[in-house]
Image: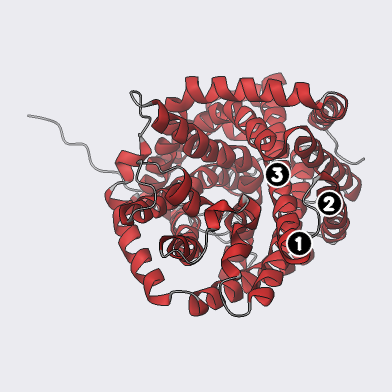
Amino acid sequence: MKNVSVVFYVSVAIMALLVLVGVTMPETLESVTSNVQGYITNTFGWYYLIVVTLFVIVCLYLLVSPIGRIKLGKQEDKPEFSRPTWLAMLFSAGMGIGLVFYGTAEPISHYAISSPTGETGTDQGIRDAMRFTFFHWGIHAWAIYGIVALCLAYFTFRKDELGLISVTLKPIIGKHANGVAGKAIDIIAVIATVIGVATTLGFGAVQINGGLSYLFDVPSNIVSQFFIILVVTALFMISALSGLGKGIKILSNANMVLAFILLVLMFILGPTLFTLNLFTDTVGAYLQNLINMSFRIAPLNEESRNWINGWTIFYWAWWIAWSPFVGIFIARVSKGRTIREFVVCVLLIPSLIGFIWFSTFGGTAMLLEHDGIASISKLATEESLFGVFANYPMASILSILAIILVGTFFITSADSGTYVLGMMTTNGSQNPSNSVKVIWGVLLTAIALVLLYSGGLQALQNTMIIAALPFSVIMALMTVSLIKALSKEAKELGIGQLKKQKLK
């Protein structure tokens, strides 16, 4: 296999061991991951909140700073993809299945089952539920992706470095980035990526199974999910072997078209005026309470703390675990953009699209429950979306469209994941070999199945929170490294330099 590095062999061995333990000792794996996850969320919850908020601050600084004029590439480099295609690709990779899976499930859970503020089933409960959903899927999530992608795009395309996580730390660890320390950093990044992508594939399989179960009484169990994952694996392998310019580009555009159709249909068929009012009201409440939510850890309220651990800390860990994958992918397709354009399009536009999505689907679900029309909260998480559709015209069409959308998001995520993992384990090759991509595709599928088998969705969540912690430290170092490198270049180019005046 061409250009394969030691990172590949060590990472594959660790992941293969995880699969072996999951198959032979599923209860042990579930128990161990649960205990470690509990320790991490209780001990490092404060750390997650602070570090993620710092990523947001750095991104916003780069947005308004003169440094934002620096290009992610050489001065003459032009973007490889059109802006709509670029936005479609980064959005499909960045959110995808999660939006469909949690589009109704999260707001209805906050409203009717467990409220972040204790206000379940009330008018205020609707506002709180939507505000915290925006918080989890908004600027903080995309800042995590944005930091990793910025670091990689800057060092790869402007500094001509390899497309590896380790090289982004050269400004602070120097030659060690090419040695054992660099290899260890890349292995941690690969493991976080594998766990993050496998978790999302598990969510996708459960959602497709939930839709088929709700519509056609297909059994909702590990056997059905096994077959769903096998079918989708075959499809994403075909796409992965066709290359970045064909498979992922076509699928990303198809995703956006399908998502747009589903969103417009739900917006028109659902409570349109309520959706518009809820969106407007919640954006204001989100912005007004952003600082408070960013640091909310509830040290004196055990019930609120458990909610934060189960939702906010889980999400920050999910985005961090996904960030090497999404970051490398976004970096790969962002060559030729300025830092300012990058931050606007990666931080703000996807957040806004997500807010519209949750207002439409989540708002509709909460209104159905609030008005006593349907008990969406009593449905399984993966069935809640289909339960909402059942109350409107064209329910079957909407449900089938949603299942197809999850399937295409599933394929795009897995396709992008195999490409990125191939790139990370072949010394940053922009075109990893098909054999490497196939090995990672098989391992991603195996790990998703093992985690579902050993403990279902909870095992997926536990493992991801564990994998995210070490990579969050690497991300913090990457951020320091990026600021150091950008400040140095800005000084060399004379960007934003103020004349120092001597105090008299």
Question: What residue appears at the point 52 percent right and 47 percent down from the top-left corner?
Answer: 146
User: Callout 1: helix, strand or loop?
Assistant: helix
Please state which of residues 308 and 137 is positioned toward the viewer in this rendering. 308
**Category of crowding for the residue at label 1, using alpha-carbon neighbours closer than 10 angstroms: few (below 14), some (14–19), many (at least 20):** many
Question: What residue appears at the point 15 percent right and 31 percent down from the top-left corner?
Answer: 502
Amino acid type at mark 1: Leu
Measured as percent of width and height from the top left, residue 204 is found at 71, 52
| 3 and 2 marks in contact (CB < 8 Å) | no
Residue 197 - label: 3
**Which residue has dot 2 on it?**
224
Closer to the chain start, of discs 1 and 3, is 3
Question: What residue appears at the point 32 percent right and 57 percent down from the top-left corner?
Answer: 123
| 1 and 2 marks in contact (CB < 8 Å) | yes
**Which residue has dot 1 on it?**
212
Is residue 64 placed above or below 46 in the rendered structure? below
Quarter of the picture containing the C terminus is top left
Which of labels 3 and 2 is toward the front? 2
